[in-house]
Image (cartoon, grey):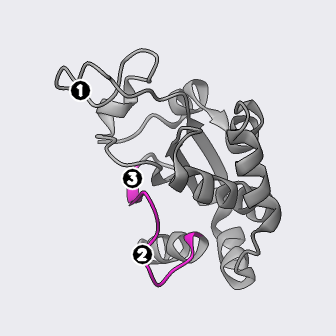
Amino acid sequence: MLLDLSKIRRKTVSVADYMNSLEEPFREKFLKRRQAYQPDQEAMIRLRESAGKYMIIVFSVGWCKDCAVNIPVLALVNEASGLEVRVFGGLKKDPLGQGRKWRIPPSPLEVETFNVDKLPLIIIADREGTEIGRIDEKPAQQHTLEQELCEIIASKQ
């Protein structure tokens, strides 16, 4: 299935706009992480070389601990490499549990299209709209998020 990247752009926000739109106390947690994190510079250079060829699509919520760890890193990746990062935010659990994990709306319909279970869900797509990889919740234990992105991209080149 090819992803319609122009439609995704219309339905999402940039990672910077997403972080700025978060309510307190979540926004503060995301911003502190962004300020404190020291990215792997070698990985950032590698990502910069691939920036025009890929897009990262993320599903996130402010209350998610793993989102507060990883979304700020994606903001730094975007700033340092130019790699486009788009965010579907505002997901809400369905407390009635009627066979759905997410309440639609306000959660976007794409939570079902992309089978979102764990957050953040980070999808890497090439410019043609082919999903080349995804990271559920957090990168592999041996990697930073930026290193994992590099590995996914390198495996498809």
Q: Secondary structure at mark 2?
A: loop
Mark 2 residue type = Ala
Q: Badge 1 local density, few (<14 within 10 Å), some, or many (20+)?
A: few
State if disc 1 and disc 2 touch (CB < 8 Å).
no
In depth, the one of 40 and 70 nearer the eye is 70
- The disc, 2 or 3, on the residue closer to the chain's N-terminal end is 3
The image quarter containing residue 116 is top left
Say which quadrant the N terminus sits in: top left
- How far apart in space, not on screen, are marks 1 and 3 (Cα)? 24 Å
Residue 152 appears at what percent x and percent y? Answer: 45, 71
Q: CA distance from mark 2 to mark 3?
A: 19 Å
Location of mark 1 (residue): 100
The residue sitting at 49% across, 70% down in the picture is 153
Q: Which residue is mark 3?
A: 131
Nearer to us of marks 1 and 3 is: 1
Q: In which image quadrant can residue 33 be found? A: bottom right
Disc 1 + disc 3, Cβ < 8 Å: no
Q: Residue at x 55, y 51 (%)?
A: 67
